[in-house]
Amino acid sequence: MTAGHSYPAELLANFPLQYATVGALAAITFSLLRNRTGAILSVGFTLTQVVLLLPFYLNSTAASPREESEFTIMFANVFVSNGRHEAVRTLFREKRPDILVI
């Protein structure tokens, strides 16, 4: 474990939907087995996870895409013995790609 990181906390933060599902299944199982304590704890755990998840599913602006932005990528497979270096440079200057792979 590195400084500032907590493995169990990261698991809780990254898998809330899965934990809510497991909690609901555990609550059903405990109810069928007539284990009242287990069922109550599972329901409480599941409700906690659902309350934490609801803002992500109810807030439509969170899922909507942000302002559209475009970028260009240019890939140039330039052979070493290519004698047209200036033509390639001119193409780069004209197109002004955001990402250039040579």
Image (tube, rainbow, N blue to C red):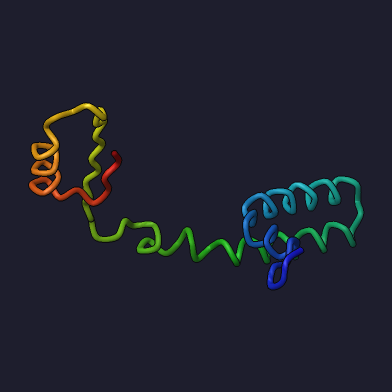
* On-image quarter of the C terminus: top left
44 shown above or below 84: below
**Which residue occupies the foreground of this view, 35 or 9?**
9
* On-image quarter of the N terminus: bottom right
**Residue at 14% from the left image edge and 30% from the top image edge:** 83
On the image, the x and y values in percent for residue 27 come to 79, 53
**Left or right: where 52 falls relative to 76:** right
Outermost bottom residue: 4
Q: Quadrant of residue 37?
A: bottom right
**Residue at 68% from the left image edge and 66% from the top image edge:** 48
**Residue at 70% from the left image edge and 53% from the top image edge:** 19
Q: Quadrant of residue 38?
A: bottom right
**Left or right: where 26 falls relative to 47:** right
**Left or right: where 50 falls relative to 61:** right
On the image, the x and y values in percent for residue 65 come to 31, 56
On the image, the x and y values in percent for residue 67 come to 24, 60
84 shown above or below 89: above
**Left or right: where 100 falls relative to 55:** left
**Residue at 11% from the left image edge and 49% from the top image edge:** 93
97 shown above or below 1: above
